[in-house]
Amino acid sequence: MKTALLLIKRHIKLFFKDKGMFLTSLITPAILLVLYATFLGNVYRDSFTASLPAGLQLSDQLINGLVGGQLISSILAVSCVTVSFCSNFLMVQDKANGTVNDLRISPVRPSVLSLSYYVATLCSTLVICYAAMALCLVYVAIVGWYLSVADVFLLCLDILLLVLFGTALSSIINFFLSTQGQISAVGTVISSGYGFICGAYMPISSFGEGLQKVIMLLPGTYGTSLVRNHAMRGALAEMEGEGVPAEAMDALREVLDCRLDFFGNKVEPGAMYAVLAVTVVALIGIYVLMNALRKKEK
């Protein structure tokens, strides 16, 4: 246990000491927030106002609160996974510069070494993602705050689960990487593509029917929906209180991906949590098995 703690401390210290990895991971959510608020805010706002029933007027603060909830849910859902990959690149860098060979010939067991990378990545990513969440909450407080204390705590839980998922996924993928070029290629693909396949950048309803079915099979989709539900619940409840018809609210929740249908069956939040939890356990199991098999081959 002492060895594992020392390795975890070493990995975390090196990550925060590497200004390239750390600043990239930390600045990315902030840049996304600025870009989303600048370019997508008006698009979301116009879309919401156009979908309202004729004659119904909502306050600018409520519309801004709804837009703000959608913006921060997109940022947080993507950042939890992409930052996990950035944090976990330390494992690949140790392979590239030969440091991992020194660690493997030491008395450290391979299982302890692989676990130390996972836990260190998890801790580093949580620090950055919770900092990004705090920044997002400040933005929401400025444009229109409708979150309850329970919503904030549930957002913290959503981030924890998504970071566990992102760390396990990145550990498996980075297991096969060993050069700086591979790090750059994978980082670019994940950063540019994950937001689309998890429904963060574009609503799932905007894709074709076939692609929608594929996206519904991906666990990240349910993580995004959980974050959306908790980031927008207060604003949506306020809209209902101001007289928006139930039919319009149901349609709005479907458009916002707050309500998901898995091949015609409504997916409840409890089921979404179960999907994420089972996926995390399965991915960690695969990661452990991969390390065990490598040890046997050697």
Image (spheres, grey):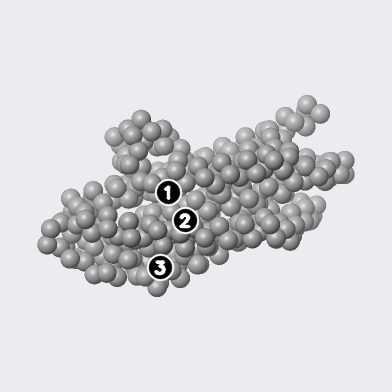
Q: Is residue 267 visible?
A: no
Identify the amino acid type marked 2: Ile
Question: Helix, strand or loop at disc 3?
Answer: helix
Observer-nearest residue: 208 or 118? 208
> Would you name the residue on which mark 3 appears?
140
Q: Residue 101 appears in which quarter of the rendering? A: top right
Q: Residue at 68% x, 39% y: name it.
A: 182
Up/down of 10 relative to 268, above or below: below
Q: Residue at 33% x, 60% y: name it.
A: 42
Q: Residue at 46% x, 37% y: name it.
A: 218
Identify the amino acid type marked 1: Ala
* Image x and y of residue 31, in percent: 52, 60
> Would you name the residue on which mark 2 appears?
75
Identify the amino acid type marked 3: Val
* Image x and y of residue 104, in percent: 83, 41
Q: Residue at 72% x, 43% y: name it.
A: 180
The Cα–Cα distance between marks 3 and 1, rounded to whole angstroms, is 18 Å
> Would you name the residue on which mark 1 appears?
200
The Cα–Cα distance between marks 2 and 3, rounded to whole angstroms, is 13 Å
Observer-nearest residue: 281 or 54? 54
Does 9 sit left or right of 163 as displayed? Answer: right
Residue 163 is marked as: none
* Image x and y of residue 30, in percent: 52, 62
Q: Earlier in the sequence, mark 1 or mark 2?
A: 2
Q: Earlier in the sequence, mark 2 or mark 3?
A: 2
The Cα–Cα distance between marks 1 and 2, rounded to whole angstroms, is 8 Å
- Please identify the quadrant where the C terminus is shown: top right
